[in-house]
Amino acid sequence: MTYVLSDIHGEYDLFCRLMEGVGFSDSDTLISCGDMIEKGKDSIRLSKLLFSMKNAVLLAGNHEYAFLKYYWGLMQTTQDYDLVLTKLRAYFPDDGDLLEWEDVDRFEALLYYFETEDFLCVHAGAPLDGEGRILPVENASCEQLVYDRKFKDPSVLPKEGKCVFFGHTPTVNLGFPPRIRCYKREGRRGDRVEDYYKVHLDTGTWISGVLGCFRTADARCFHVTKNPRFGG
């Protein structure tokens, strides 16, 4: 089984609960569409867990990209690697002391998109032409893939293409409940990933306390929450 999620934002315990709830195993695949870090208190602890998962495909979000830009800037101003690591650790006030150079290397190695025959995963949005068709994502800039502002709009539905998984903007910021929002194609049953134009994965975990994932085999969504308002 393949599970897709996004915007965990340092919520280590909630992520573990979600994986336990879906029965995630070594035979499954996890795709994280970015923003593992910040907001929550366990950015590096969570990142280390995800980095250690051999069956995880990890994408950069705007928060990882901002961290990398900070790192690249430091490397241009000093050759004191101990000082650089000290400053990088300070970037994460809650658990930055856990950060090691191998973690920095893994942040640098993050993908900016992931594509299969049936779907495309990005952090913020996919490039579209004037008629709404998906353009070759390999030609898109990193900035577009992690900062796109238009793709979140409900009216933007990619035509003649694969289902696109994305996060970046909490669904609650668009006036929807803190749940994964799936945009089904007309006349489709909805039990296959191909039945959807796009799937908006960001449940606003750091705002709502809700984290969810989408299972591609049967197009089912799963959620866990630490907020009693949304089910305990």
Image (spheres, grey):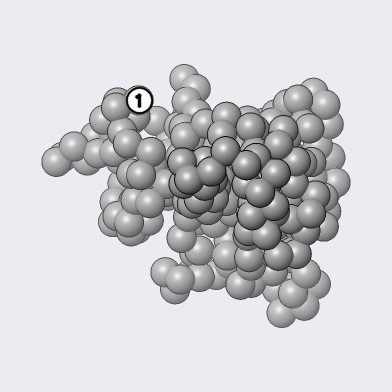
Q: Nearer the viewer, residue 82 or 166?
A: 82
Residue at the spot x=77%, y=77% of the render?
Answer: 228
Residue at the spot x=85%, y=46% of the render?
Answer: 20
Mark 1 highlights which residue?
138
Q: Nearer the viewer, residue 91 or 8?
A: 91
Q: Position of residue 177 (x, y in %)?
A: 55, 70
Q: Taking 166 as reference, is 90 above or below it?
A: below
Q: Taking 226 as reference, is 11 above or below it?
A: above
Q: Position of residue 72 (x, y in %)?
A: 49, 42
Q: Nearer the viewer, residue 23 or 188?
A: 23
Q: Residue furthest bottom?
A: 229
Tell me the quadrant of the picture where the C terminus can be found.
Answer: bottom right
Left or right of 56 in this view: 136: left
Q: Residue furthest left?
A: 130
Q: Nearer the viewer, residue 25 or 83?
A: 83
Q: Disc 1 residue type?
A: Glu
The image quadrant of residue 105 is top right
Tell me the quadrant of the picture where the N terminus can be found.
Answer: top right
Residue at the spot x=64%, y=72% of the render?
Answer: 208
Q: Position of residue 126 (x, y in %)?
A: 35, 40
Residue 185 in sight: no
The image quadrant of residue 230 is bottom right
Question: How many other residues sit within 10 Å of disc 1, few (<14), some (14-19) or many (≥20)?
Answer: few
The image quadrant of residue 180 is bottom right
Q: Taking 203 as reference, is 75 above or below it?
A: above
Residue 109 in sight: yes
Q: Position of residue 164 (x, y in %)?
A: 43, 39
Q: Secondary structure at mark 1?
A: helix
Residue at the spot x=74%, y=46% of the render?
Answer: 99
